[in-house]
Image (cartoon, helix red, strand yellow):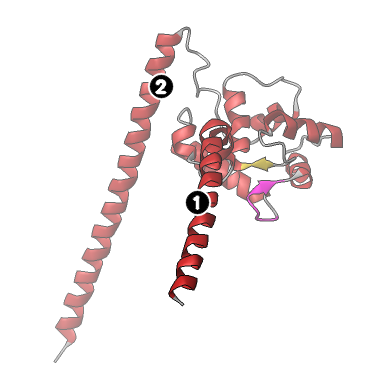
Amino acid sequence: MAADELASRLNRRLRLGTGGDAGGDSDSDQHSDGERRQPCMRVFKPYTEFKEFTRKQIKDMECMFKQYDAGKDGFIDLMELKRMMEKLGAPQTHLGLKEMIKEVDEDFDGKLSFREFLLIFRKAAAGELEEDSGLHALARLSEIDVSTEGVKGAKNFFEAKVQAINHGSRFEQEIKAEQEEKKRQAEEKEQRKAAFKELQSAFKP
């Protein structure tokens, strides 16, 4: 029995060792080209990666994305994009829709993730979209103003750096403002509770 248990333990370790080696390969993949894929997958922090936009702008884009993600699967596919463009008043041909997706489709799955959706607005802010393109129409008609964002107006590297620092401090200010608002709401809630308790005790015999 002891020999059998030892053999099974050794087999398990060998299997784990093999899995560990494979895992090591996948880790290196993640650090090489995996890091390019990761933002399109689950580990994606829009506020960190898209610092050129305010938190409000990103939230507005997220609301818009969710509005047209009819399947609620975290992607906008060809038919959902078709409906979006029709609703925005800029219908596209089937080929035009495919071209729109292709321009920002980093993982080549034929649909838009939220990160790829944000890339549309990044390109629009940087002036990288053709004026007659479907993506330009989407960004222009979305009512999310990104025209003054990004480093489009930076004349050189140092100005771009200054802008990046300003975006970072603005991001921190927005977080601080959100935290203060939450704190204020929590304090008001506690005050209402205390007032209610006081009112209750006043009516107790």
Residue reaching furthest to the front = 3
Q: Which residue is mark 1?
A: 17
Q: CA distance from mark 2 to mark 1?
A: 45 Å
Q: What secondary structure is found at the residue carrying circle 1?
A: helix
Q: Is residue 33 left or right of residue 183?
A: right
Give, as a single range, the part of the protein colored magenta.
71-76
Left or right side of 70 for 49:
left
Q: Is residue 172 visible?
A: yes
At 27% from the left and 63% from the top, the residue drawn is 189
Does the magenta segment cover residue 46? no
- Say above or below: 93 vs 201: above
Q: Depth check: 44 or 62 in front?
A: 44
Please provide percent x and percent y for residue 133.
Answer: 75, 25
What label sits on residue 33 in the rendered view?
none
Q: Amino acid at mark 2?
A: Ala
The amino acid marked with disc number 1 is Gly
Q: Is residue 194 above or below residue 167?
A: below
Is 74 colored magenta in this rendering? yes
Whether residue 93 can be seen here:
no
Q: Quadrant of the C terminus?
A: bottom left
Residue in the picture at 21% in, 64% down:
191
In the structure shown, which secondary structural element does the residue marked by tag 2 occupy?
A: helix
For image coordinates 51% across by 34% down, the residue present is: 31
Instruction: Name the residue located 82 percent from the left edge and 35 percent from the top edge.
Output: 92
The image shows residue 84 at horizontal and vertical percentages of 73, 43
Q: Mark 1 Cα within 10 Å, few/some/many (few <14, many 20+)?
A: few
Q: Position of residue 142 (x, y in %)?
A: 64, 36
Q: Where is residue 28 shown, x and y percent of the image?
A: 52, 36
Q: Which residue is mark 2?
A: 164
